Amino acid sequence: MATARRPSAGGQRRDPRHERLDAINQEFLCDPKFSDEEDLEEKLAVFKEKYMEFDLNNQGEIDLMSVKRMMEKMGAPKTHLELKKMISEVTGGVSETISYQDFVNVMLGKRSAVLKLVMMFEGKANESNPKPSGPPPERDIASLP
């Protein structure tokens, strides 16, 4: 008779990507290039969550279809050619997928990559424009443009 497996003390197994991405985050925290970056630890935590959200195949890299879904979710759909150009911009043209290191380098870097701009736009839009709940207010003819 087979014995039932008990869950670990935490209840669920931790996603192995967490440890891998935490190790990469630690490298950025120890890198003197980023020592003057304000709130680096908090930024890296946000980047890790965003990256994992769009790592659809759980392989530790964001591929073309993942970037496509990310852009659609942000309300900025792109053509395949535009997506390939974005990936090439992030990776320096050496890969067809975005690694976590590439992602963080772009987000912390000084240059304005398209992906960085879109991610920043999404964050600011979510902060400053909470969606109103309930039905829209009644309008009369005088309120029309």
Image (cartoon, rainbow, N blue to C red):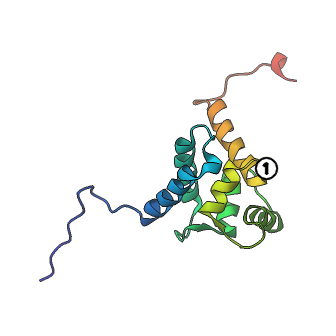
> Can residue 74 be seen in the rendering of this structure?
no
Percent coordinates x, y for residue 17 in the rendering = 47, 64
Farthest-out residue, left: 1
Q: Secondary structure at mark 1?
A: loop
18 in relation to 36, above or below: below
Amino acid type, callout 1: Arg
Task: Indicate the quadrant where residue 5 lies.
Answer: bottom left
Percent coordinates x, y for residue 50 in the rendering = 57, 52
Percent coordinates x, y for residue 143 in the rendering = 81, 19
| Residue at the image point whose x is 47% and y is 57% from the top | 22
Please tell me how crowded label 1 is: few (under 14), some (14-19), or many (20+) other residues with Cα within 10 Å. Answer: few
Percent coordinates x, y for residue 137 in the rendering = 67, 23
118 sits left or right of 46 in the view? right
| Residue at the image point whose x is 67% and y is 70% from the top | 97
* Residue at mark 1: 111
Farthest-out residue, front: 32
Q: Say which quadrant the N terminus sits in.
A: bottom left
> Can residue 7 be seen in the rendering of this structure?
yes
Q: Nearer the viewer, residue 54 or 138?
A: 54
Q: Say which quadrant the C terminus sits in.
A: top right
| Residue at the image point whose x is 73% and y is 66% from the top | 91
80 in relation to 76, above or below: below
Q: Nearer the viewer, residue 56 or 115?
A: 115
Give the tally of numbered discs: 1
Q: Nearer the viewer, residue 140 or 71?
A: 71
Task: Indicate the quadrant where residue 84 lies.
Answer: bottom right
